[in-house]
Image: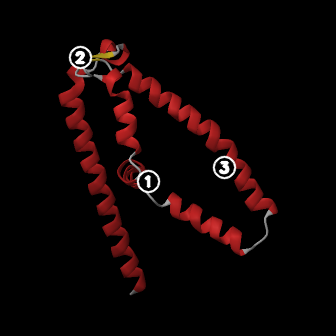
Amino acid sequence: MQEQAKKIAFALLTLSAMTVAGFVVIILAYIIYNGYSAISIEFLTEMPRMRMTQGGIYPAIVGTVLLIIGSMAAALPTGIMAAIYLNEYAGETRTTWLIEMAINNLAGTPSVVFGLFGLALFVKYFGFGSSLLSLASPFLF
């Protein structure tokens, strides 16, 4: 009986994963089919102009690459050193248990949730977004 339940659960999970993968393929095919004509070397290497309604996405690409490099430069050594310390040197205490639980919770939360939390906290509650935008607005428009 229990083996039959495992097979049914596995089949449902496989069906769910295949459905999600199918929708991802459909969405990617739609984007590629309708957006292929807009992609060019000029679009990827030019600066935006006309209030960012024309031109390219070069600054977005460079900014993304620099953000990834900076994040990895900070997170990789810190994470490796913390993992080595927690695994090899730290004892089994309540603090290490709390750290492990926090890491598991962070790993199980999609990053978009953290982005929305940051938007709500820093932009909506503290007002950082509107004040920074008002300072930069003369240069943007």
Report how far apart the C-alphas of labels 1 and 2 lie in the structure. Answer: 32 Å
Q: Which residue is identified by label 3? A: 79
Q: Residues within 10 Å of mark 1 (few under 14, many from 20)?
A: few
Q: Quick one: label 3 or label 1, which is nearer the N terminus?
A: 3
Give the residue displayed 46% in from the left and 23% down from the top: 62
Kindly check if marks 1 and 2 are in contact, taking CB atoms under 8 A apart as contact.
Answer: no
Q: Name the outermost residue toward the bottom.
A: 1
Which residue sits furthest left? 34
In the image, residue 50 sits, relative to residue 70, either above or below, namely above
Q: How far apart are marks 3 and 1 (CA)?
A: 19 Å
Please name the residue shown 29% across and 54% down the image.
20
* CB under 8 Å between discs 3 and 2: no
Image coords of residue 113 (percent x, y): 40, 55
- Examine the rendered structure and indicate whether residue 5 appears above or below residue 105: below
The residue indicated by pointer 2 is 50
Q: What element carries label 1?
A: helix
How many residues crowd mark 3 within 10 Å: few (<14), some (14–19), many (20+)? Answer: few
Left or right of 106: which side holds 135? left
Image location of residue 110, percent across then percent down: 42, 55
**Circle 1 sits on which residue?**
114
Q: Closer to the camera: disc 1 or disc 2? A: 2
* Amino acid of disc 3: Gly
> From the viewer's perspective, is 132 left or right of 68?
left
Question: Closer to the observer: label 3 or label 2?
Answer: 2
In the depicted structure, whether residue 46 falls above or below residue 76: above
Q: What residue type is labelled 1?
A: Phe
Tag 3 and tag 1, C-beta contact below 8 Å: no
Q: How far is disc 3 from disc 2 in space, using C-alphas?
A: 42 Å
> Which SS class for mark 2?
loop
What number is the disc on residue 72?
Answer: none
